[in-house]
Image (tube, rainbow, N blue to C red):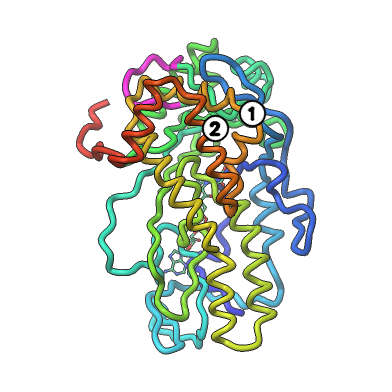
Amino acid sequence: MTLVDPHPDRRWRHTYGAWADEVPLTGPDALPRDVVAASGPGFAIARRTHPLAGDYAVLDTGALQEALHHPAVTVHRGRVVGRAEGTAFLDGGERLAAPLVLDATGAAQVLSRSRRQVPRAAEQTAVGVVVPSSVAARVTGGRLVFMDWRPLHGHPGWPTFLYAIPLGGDDWLLEETSLARRPGLPLAELTERLRRRLVACGLEEGDIPLDDRTRVEHVRFAVDTPSHRPPAGVVPLGAAASLVHPATGYSLTRSLVIATRLADALATRPDHAARLDAAGRAVRSTAGRVVHAMRRRGLDVLLRMPPCEVPEFFERFFSLPAAAQRGYLGAHDDVANSMGAMLAVFRHLSPRLRGHLIAGSLLGAGRDHSGEDGY
Ligand SMILES: Cc1cc2nc3c(=O)[nH]c(=O)nc-3n(C[C@H](O)[C@H](O)[C@H](O)COP(=O)(O)OP(=O)(O)OC[C@H]3O[C@@H](n4cnc5c(N)ncnc54)[C@H](O)[C@@H]3O)c2cc1C
């Protein structure tokens, strides 16, 4: 097996979080426990404070990268630019025999994208600072906060929330996040909101190292990478396969779990055609596609909702029983569970919010916000 990567030695720097019970620490491809930097209960704040529906885990990204190395994989530095008749073409003119290619090129979908026209992606954007635990405690009281929708930044317009998590050791990340917008809310706006929110919580400017690049995280990624019918011989994976949850942006643990299924499919099928077929189904089962399509509607609802209603929507969401919350946030291949969770959300909303939900479901996401970023 050959891995083609333009920067195989680059250290991964993103901060990754997940539901603790979704991190594969047991089973055939169990990750070592040190991939979890911190885990525990968390809270979501909308109008009131709600305990999260399950423990939350923050990963040690370096340990994860280390754990995913395998000595049997040949690493080839380069960029794949095309594939035809069982051969992959690289940017330097090289060719590699490739009867089956797993396209894990993320939102670029280098080999999986068809000519179908797709709208501009909705993006999640965020800006975070890393601070000592004693400073973070002055903002969150020492609690892991999944979302804090209180508009303490004082800016009107598109709603954003604070995400506050321990990174292991004495570091905490405090991040102002725009869940989804088309295009993503500009990072400069998020930086300013973060600064103002933290000052409103009692921090001094000197406590907020937004000028120190080593203490700042910038986040921008597509939450709705489109589904294409990939060419024969190509199986997309990860964000390239639209495995990103459209309403949360999460994909990491799902991709890790699917990687095991995929490896089984490749190792156990007797011939190329059977391997190809099983690999495609391992990544995107019919049930997984149905659930994803429903969640794309959920994203449309969120994108269309008037900004002032969003915190109330999350107040209702986080008041639901834990099973319904997780049915929406997880259960990626379970149509009945996901549908049940969406119906539970609907029943729990006020008549006005139900109206927005119906409008988003039937009429789509509404306008693109390009050109309105005079924040
Ligand atoms: C800062 C940040 C924080 C995030 N936090 C979370 C989180 O907490 N939890 C969560 O679940 N998700 C999170 N996400 C979102 C999610 O992790 C991303 O969607 C995830 O990185 C997708 O993984 P991927 O491997 O499919 O694609 P990517 O991470 O985009 O990786 C694509 C890879 O393909 C390579 N590549 C591109 N073109 C070529 C080519 N032509 N040939 C060969 N290789 C190529 C790139 O170099 C890159 O290494 C976060 C994203 C960001 C940016």
**Image disc number at residue 344:** 2
Q: Which secondary structure dominates the residues rendered in magenta?
A: loop
Of residue 88 and residue 79, the one placed in the foreground of this image is 88
The verdict on label 1 being within 8 Å of ligand 1 is: no
Q: Is residue 216 left or right of residue 301?
A: right
Q: Is mark 2 on a helix, strand or loop?
A: helix
For residue 19, above or below residue 349: below
For residue 153, above or below residue 245: above
Q: Can residue 254 be seen in this view?
A: yes
Tell me the residue at 43%/72% (across/down).
Answer: 79
In contact (CB < 8 Å): disc 1 and disc 2: yes
Q: Alpha-carbon distance for marks 1 and 2?
A: 9 Å
Res. 75 image quadrant: bottom right
Res. 90 image quadrant: bottom left
The quarter of the picture where the N terminus appears is bottom right
Q: What residue type is labelled 2?
A: Ala
Task: Count the marks.
Answer: 2
Q: What stretch is highlighted in magenta?
A: 151-160
